[in-house]
Image: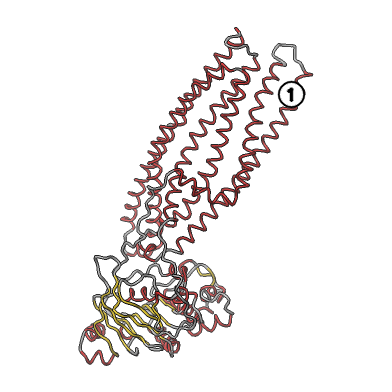
Amino acid sequence: MANPYAAGGSAAATISTVRGNAGAGEGPNQGMDVTGYGVGTVLRRVMRYVGPHLPLLVVAFVTAAASVVLQLYVPVLIGNAIDCMVVAGRVDFARLAPILQRLASVVAAAGACQWVQGYCTNRLSYNTARDLRVDAYGKLERQALSFVDSHSHGDLLSRVINDVDQVSDGLLQGFTQLFNGVATIVGTIAFMLSISVPVALVVILLTPLSVLAAGIIARKSAASFAAQQSLQGELGGFAEEVIGNQKLVTAFAHAPADVATFSRVNARLYEKGVHAQFISSLSNPSTRLVNNITYAAVAIAGCASVISGWPTPLTVGQVQSFLSYANQYMKPFNEISAVVTQVQTAFASARRLLALMDAVEEEPDAPTTKALPAPRGELEMDHVCFSYTKDRPLLQDVCIHVPAGKRFALVGPTGCGKTTLINLLLRFYDVDGGTITLDGEDTRGLTRQSLRSAFGMVLQETWLFEGTVRDNIAYGVPDATDEQVVAAAKRAHAHKFIMQLPQGYQTLVGEGGGALSQGQRQLLCIARVMMCDPAVLLLDEATSSIDTRTELQVQDAFDRMMEGRTSLVVAHRLSTVRNADCIIVMRDGRVVEKGTHDELLATGGFYRDLYQSQFAR
C-alpha cells in the first residue's frame, strides 16, 4: 500500500526538525535578498494577483471617480444657495428649493458610490490576500528541507501571514485612496478654473511646496520601514521558538535570559519603528502648514475680488465655493502623506514576500524519472558521500546493502550520520557522491512521490496536529474506515489508552499532543505508520519515549510488522537491535563494522565498547 504519510511536501514539513546530527548548514537557497525589488517590479508582481479580480478594481475606480465628481459639485450648489439669500430679508425661496433638493440627491449619490467603492476595495483586498497566501504557502511546501532548516520558522510564518496582510491593506487600499486623492486634485482644479483662473493659479502655484515636503519625507522614511519589517520577522521567529519550547525554557530556568534577548530585539524594533513613524509623521504637519498658507491666500484673493472686482469679479457664494475647493484641493495631500506610511510598510512587506516567492525551489522531478509501483524494499548505498556544508565532511564512502525483507540497524555515537542516512534515503537531501538505489533503481531516477511513498517513518520527536485521535492515526490514509483505524491502534498497543480518553477515538488532540504523555503520542505516531503498511520501515529512536513494559509490547508489534518487510532501525539503546539481521556500526561518518549482535561482540571492536558502556556493571 502506498504511504502518503511519508511522501510529498507535508511529510517534509512534518520532519523538518530532522537535520542530521552534524547540523544543517546553509543550502543553496539560503538568503532572501530584498534589495533587488524596485517599485515597478513590486507593482507588476502584485498586479498579477489583482488581474483575476480586475472587474472589482475597475468598479472601485469608476465609483471613486463618480464620488469625487459628486462631492466637488456640492460646493457649487452651496455657493448658489448662498447667493439666493445673501441679502437680509430677501431670500429667493423659488430658486433655493430646487437647489436644496439637488444638493440632497447629490450627497446621497456620493454616499452610495463611496459604499460601492469600499465594498469592491475590500473584496479585492481579501481575494488578493487569499491568493498571495496560498501561493506563498505552496512555495514553502515546494522548498527543499535545507531551505526550511536554514531559515527561522517564525520569520517564514511572518512572511506568509503578516506580510501578506500588509501588502493587501497597504498597496490595494492605499492605492485606492491615492486614486481618490488624485481625482480630487484634478477635479478641484477644473472647478476652480471654471470659477476664476487668477484665484485658481494662486492655489496651483503654492502646490509644489506641499509636494516637495511630502516627497523628501517619504524618501527618508522608506529605509526605516524596510528595517522595521525585517525586525518584526526576527522578533516573530524568536518568539515562535521560545513559546514552542516553553517547557525546556522553564526547566533550564532560561526565562530571564530569553526575556532579555526578546527585550533587546524589541528595543531595536522600537527604535526603528519610532524613527520611521517620526519621519513619516512630519509629512502631515508640513503639508498642513502649506495648506493653511494656501487657504489664507485664497481667502485674501477672494475677498479682494468681491470688494473691488480685482483680479476677477466674484460673488460671496463663489468665494465660499472657492474656499471649499481650496480646502478639498489640499486635503488629498494630507491624506496622501498619511497613506505614505501604509504604502511604505506595504512595499517593505511585498519585497520580503517576493523574496520568498523567488527563492530557489527543490529541483522538480526530471522528465525521465519514473514511478516505482510495487517496491520490494531492497536498498543499497554505494560509496555515498555527503556534507551539509562543504567545509565539514560528514558521510564518507558509505557502502551498505540491505536485502529486501531484512532487518538492519544503524548504531553509533551521536553525530556519526545515522539520521542523515535516512534523510538521504528519502531524498530530503541529495548525495554529493555515490549512489543510493531502491530495488536496483537509482533514487534520483525515481519520482519523489513514488520513492517516499515506499517508506514509513516513526521519529523520536512526535508530531500530532490539532484534530481527533482518529484523524491523527488516519493521516496517511484519509479514507480509512473506523475498523482499520482501530486495528492499527491495537497493533500499536494504543487502543487501550485511547478508549480511556473522554471521547475515545473522537477525543480532540491539541497542537503537539495536548495533555497526552510523550509515550502516548509516540504510540499514536506508530499506529499512523502501521495504517500505511509501507514497503520499507524507518525507525529513528521510535521507542525511546516509551516505558520499558510498553516498549516490549510495541517491539513485539514491530517484530510482527517487520516480518517480510525491509526495516532500518536507528537506535542508541543497543538492547533494541540485538535481533537485527545485520547491525551497521558508524563512527565519524564512516561504516566501521557490520555483522550480527553476536558476531560484533565476538570481534571485540567498537560495537563491543558501545555495548559494554551501556550494560557494564
Q: Please identify the quarter of the rendering in which residue 522 is found.
A: bottom left
- Most extreme residue toward the left is 604
Residue placed at 39% from the left, 48% from the top?
Answer: 36
x then y, percent, for residue 594: 27, 87
Q: Is residue 380 above or below residue 229?
A: below
Query: Which amino acid is tagged 1?
Result: Ile
Q: Is residue 11 left or right of residue 315?
A: left
Tell me how many marks there are: 1
x then y, percent, for residue 504: 55, 76
Q: Quadrant of the C terminus?
A: bottom left
**Closer to us: 339 or 458:** 339
Which color mode does the image show? secondary structure
Q: Is residue 7 above or below residue 97?
A: below
Query: Is residue 617 at least partly visible in the picture?
Result: no
**Closer to us: 43 or 538:** 43
Badge 1 density bin: few <14, some 14–19, many ≥20, Cα 10 Å: some
Query: Is residue 42 at least partly visible in the picture?
Result: yes
- Most extreme residue toward the front is 368
- Residue assigned mark 1: 99
- Most extreme residue toward the top is 308
**Closer to us: 68 or 295:** 68
Q: Is residue 137 above or below residue 611?
A: above
Label 1, secondary structure: give it. Answer: helix
Residue placed at 48% from the left, 60% from the top?
Answer: 137
x then y, percent, for residue 533: 49, 83
Q: Please identify the quarter of the rendering in which residue 222 is found.
A: top left
Q: Is residue 504 left or right of residue 375?
A: right
x then y, percent, for residue 188: 59, 26
Q: Is residue 237 left or right of residue 599?
A: right
Q: Is residue 199 above or below residue 172?
A: above
